[in-house]
């Protein structure tokens, strides 16, 4: 039985060509039954809600020709379906999820020659008043390099029925650097995260 939804499937959605609706002041708040976020409007971000059932939001900016340079924020509710895992602490579930994601990247990406994985660092980070479990890493292909950060937010310290998976990535062709940083927009969106228990 599958324990969690993997972020790997979302990364496929995010790699699609230009997508979604422009984020403006009128639609900058994105609300699902279990969480909401506010995205900085009028900065070029576009929104796709590919899976309402799993409460998935993909927000992205294309910085050049399609598939060449992009910045992506992804948010997803992840149900903990295994009753045994529901009794675990947030840190135990976070460790299990992060280790599983790393294993999937190695088995489905590195071992199949799709990309190289490096600089994997797992930790904790406080953003605003939220404590998040993180995994930061870099993937490299012949056509692109990606720096990415996985953030996991739990409504409670233990006995969670679900958690929120947040993934931020910057994908650029080799040797390409962007003058403007989008990381601050991401942090502001992350600070705005509100979760219902």
Image (cartoon, rainbow, N blue to C red):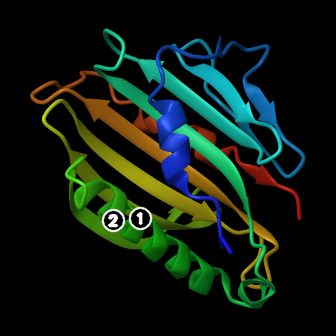
Q: Are marks 2 and 1 in contact (CB under 8 Å)?
A: yes
Q: Nearer the viewer, residue 111 or 179?
A: 111
Residue 80 percent location from the top left of the image? 75, 72
**Residue 180 drawn above or below residue 144:** above
Q: Is residue 25 visible?
A: yes
**Residue 66 drawn above or below residue 168:** above
- Residue at x-position 54% and y-position 72%: 97
Quadrant of the image for the C terminus? Answer: bottom right
- Residue at x-position 57% and y-position 41%: 74
- Residue at x-position 41% and y-position 73%: 123
Q: Mark 1 = which residue? A: 104
Tag of residue 107:
2
SS state under label 2: helix
Q: Is residue 28 left or right of residue 136?
A: right
Quadrant of the image for the N terminus? Answer: bottom right
Kindly indicate the quadrant of the structure image that contains residue 111: bottom left
- Residue at x-position 90% and y-position 46%: 33
Q: Is residue 124 left or right of residue 194?
A: left
Residue 154 percent location from the top left of the image? 70, 69
- How busy is the neighbourhood of tag 2: few (under 14 within 10 Å), some, or many (20 plus)? few
The span from disc 2 to disc 1 (Cα, nearest Å) is 5 Å
Q: Total number of numbered labels?
A: 2
Residue 163 percent location from the top left of the image? 71, 65
Q: Is residue 185 visible?
A: no
Q: Is residue 46 left or right of residue 163?
A: left
């Amino acid at each position: 039985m599958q324990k969690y939804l993997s972020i790997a499937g979302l990364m496929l959605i995010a790699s699609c060509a230009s997508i979604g609706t422009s984020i403006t002041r009128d639609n900058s708040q994105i609300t699902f039954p279990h969480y909401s976020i506010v995205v900085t409007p009028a900065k070029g971000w576009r929104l796709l809600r590919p899976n309402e059932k799993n409460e998935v939001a993909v927000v992205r900016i294309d910085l050049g020709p399609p598939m060449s340079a992009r910045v992506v924020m992804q948010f997803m509710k992840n149900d903990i379906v295994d009753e045994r895992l529901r009794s675990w602490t947030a840190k135990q579930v976070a460790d299990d999820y992060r280790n599983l994601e790393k294993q999937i990247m190695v088995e489905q990406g590195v071992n199949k020659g799709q990309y190289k994985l490096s600089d994997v660092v797992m930790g904790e980070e406080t953003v605003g008043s939220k404590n998040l479990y993180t995994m930061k890493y870099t993937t490299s292909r012949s056509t692109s390099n990606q720096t990415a950060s996985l953030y996991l937010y739990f409504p409670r310290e233990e006995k969670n029925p679900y958690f929120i998976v947040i993934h931020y990535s910057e994908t650029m062709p080799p040797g390409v650097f962007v003058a403007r940083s989008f990381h601050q927009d991401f942090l502001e969106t992350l600070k705005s995260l509100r979760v219902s228990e």
